[in-house]
Amino acid sequence: ACSANKDYIESQGGVKEYGSSLDESDEDQDSTNSVEPKLDPTGGFLPLVISVASVWSEEVFITRTDAMQQQYVTEFLLQSLKGGDLEQNDIGHEHSGSSLASTLVQGITLRLEVSRAESIRIDGMLIAEAMSSIIGQSIRFDELHPSDEGQERVEGDRAKYGVVQKNSERKRTKTKKHRAKKKPLTLDPDAEYVSDAEDSFDSGDVSSYGDSLESDGSSSCSSNSSWGEDSLEPYVMDDDEEDLRRVRRPRSLRECFAYLIENENETLACDKHESALMELPAMVSCRPLDLVDMTPTLVRILLHMEDKFNMENFVQMKMDSLMAFAVHAPIETCLHLVNEIGENVSLGTRLEALTVLGGMAQELSGLSELRNRQELQSKQRESQLPNNVDEIAMSSKLQRSLNLYNNPNVSSRSNDLEESPQSTSNVSKTRRWRRPRTTTITVTNRFGPIAAQMMYSLFAFISRTKSEESIWGGPLGEKFLSEFLRTLSIMLDCSRTYPGNSVHVMAQDLFELAWSFHDAQSSEVRYAVLAAMGTSISLVPVEFLMRVGHFIGE
């Protein structure tokens, strides 16, 4: 600290020479009689310590600076506080709006938090004890003055970051000297003295001695080698290879939006489009806060998005992203898709929007999950059946019901019993063929509460645009009408398990809408009409069927 003060004073123009007014005879006196000037802490040294302490007390310095660098700054402050140049008035003296005491208290408070590393907390404790001795208070931390084991732990932590105390160096020197001492060699005067060196060792002893040397050498080499097992780092099995990506993974819906609208002439446009399409389903399933706000914009972009880079699985990734929005934001997605199909778009875009609406109804109603569970149960049931059909003995009645009576691979139980009459006592009379028991599968229908709003948005669309030739006219209009009626049939079928009277009202409206196209020229439209009427006829009341029965008969 004193050397730093001298360097600072010399940079300001040097120390004024004392004794310049004395005679030349006084200058020849011994150097021991010369008076050294006393350093003024308030002049240049105190501002320097305050500036270092302000950096030491910043949270950014604590959290982001290397531990070794923090140790060096702490040692500088310790030497400044313990050097004797600073007094209680100097610590409380304000310089540029802040004093050394307030600055150090701020740094000590930040460093003594529980979440800090142990070396950082120790630095704060050391500065606190040094400052308390100046201001006349006594502060003592048990972590700095523990037992012998605790002292070794503290010193080991500080030595790990490159700062080793002198006491630890002295202890290590004493330990080495203690280890270097050897016990004196004692000789037995009565032992037999052998003068011939060749007779003192057998060949086996020499070989065993050489082997022991080789084993010791190899063990020392293996212990000192840097290629041991301790230096090998384990391979991370769940590495997502984030560092190999050409573009950063998007973290929010707004970043996905920025990736999707990237100009196709940019260098990383293909990578950004692919990264956004891959991350959107998982991101939407987490239901972020801006999901409702970003749904219309992203659904519009995805609906009109084209594969300009010939990406692998582009159609599947695009449909997965649209279905994610449809499942987690169904109302907003449905209303926006209905508005999009009424615009001047292609037939493929309209059919894709209807596919999303139908898939959304099946996913929310639980039909997809129910179908997957049933397929899994059927596979498990098939795996339990015997692989060899020859081992199955069936009765004649069962063979006739299964059309296996003339199958040579299936043996008849009656024939087996006739051939071996002694085996009748071994056959159980209660053995029957029946369907194995299956567990009941239940799913929650989340489409029922919103089915009316979605279906009547489509009814309002066809009522509003029924006179537009660009939508319903020609072969393209007939194709769109058939898919439109099939989508309404899917929605009604998915909402039939939801309790309430709204299902019957929707069934009546769909029946009347489908019946208005029963005499269409396109066979595809007539097939869609039959599908819609077949779906709704089981849900309409009997009074409605009696009222419209004569129209159907005619």
Image: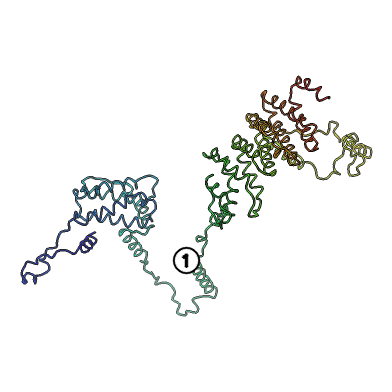
Q: Is residue 329 visible?
A: yes
Q: Residue 385 occupies which quadrant of the picture? A: top right
Residue situated in front as seen by the camera: 71 or 224: 71
Q: Quadrant of the C terminus?
A: top right
Residue 427 in the image: state x and y as whole percent: 86, 35
Mark 1 is surrounded, within 10 Å at the Cα level, by few (under 14), some (14 to 19) or many (20 or more) other residues, namely few
25 vs 543, left or right, is left
Q: Is residue 444 visible?
A: no
- Circle 1 sits on which residue? 224
Number of marks drawn: 1
Q: What residue type is labelled 1?
A: Asn
Residue drawn at x 72%, y 33% is 489
Is 111 placed above or below 230 here?
A: above
541 vs 294, left or right, is right
Residue situated in front as seen by the camera: 47 or 518: 518
Residue 356 in the image: state x and y as whole percent: 66, 40
Residue 464 in the image: state x and y as whole percent: 66, 32
Q: Which residue lies furthest to the right in this view?
A: 418
Q: Indicate the secondary structure of the residue bearing disc 1.
A: helix
Residue 523 in the image: state x and y as whole percent: 81, 37
Rendering colour mode: rainbow
Q: Quadrant of the N terminus?
A: bottom left
Q: Residue 309 occupies which quadrant of the picture? A: bottom right
Is 314 placed above or below 441 here?
A: below
123 vs 93, left or right, is right
